[in-house]
Image (cartoon, rainbow, N blue to C red):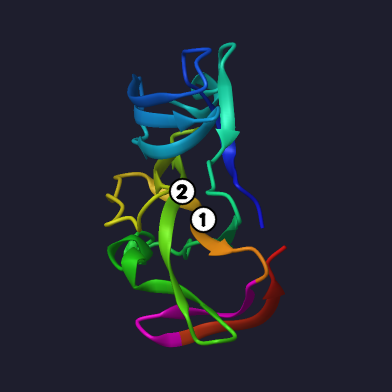
Amino acid sequence: VSANLFSPINVGTPKKNANGAQVASGTLSLKDGKFSKLAITPVQTLTLMKKGSYTVSECYVPEGQRMVQVSAEPPAESGTDAWAWADGVTDFKLKDSASKTYDVRGAFAKVRSGREDRMVATYDASAPISGLSRDENRPTDVYLAFIVPTGTQLTSLDFKGQAIQQFQLAVQ
């Protein structure tokens, strides 16, 4: 349970609220000094993205809710499609003990380009995401973000209606 990205982004402004601000890697919106929307492409290295005085790493989460992130590593074997998960990102859901499901609100991937790590990210605090674009570089770490009410008892990660990982997690 964390609302932080795997790497901070310099937002280029001291403002706590911004809508559709442009940065070298894409666009972002801020609410209370946290990301409320993100659309990041891997044009800059993580090292360059976090350079500067106005770095932000936390995503905005509405009051009374928490962000739950599921992390994974795509297959590393050559010949495998390391981006297959992105094609079906909207088919992933978290399920709670009452069988209610929660849509993906964010997808973040660390991608390797040469010797440098970069970021592909999409996030919307107010609505489920519609997808995530593939990149020519191979993802090494993947994070799916869900927004769920505090006090929820999560029981599984589902893909296309089928449980792919069962667990017990009380969201506090």
| Residue 29 quadrant | top left
Residue 105: percent from left, percent from top: 42, 56
Residue 145 seen from this side? yes
Residue 107: percent from left, percent from top: 43, 53
Residue at the location (46% across, 41% down)? 112
Is 21 positioned to the left or the right of 57 in the image? left
Whether residue 158 is in magenta: the answer is yes
- Quarter of the figure with the C terminus: bottom right
Q: Amino acid at mark 1?
A: Tyr
Q: Amino acid at mark 2?
A: Phe
Taking depth in this image into account, of 50 and 12 the one nearest to the observer is 12
- Quarter of the figure with the N terminus: bottom right
Q: Which residue is tagged 1?
A: 143
The magenta-colored residue range is 152-162
CB atoms of marks 1 and 2 within 8 Å: yes
Q: Is residue 155 above or below residue 104?
A: below
Q: Earlier in the sequence, mark 1 or mark 2?
A: 2
Q: Secondary structure at mark 2?
A: strand
Q: Which residue is tagged 2?
A: 108
Mark sitting on residue 20: none
Residue 101: percent from left, percent from top: 45, 77
Magenta residues: mostly which secondary structure?
strand
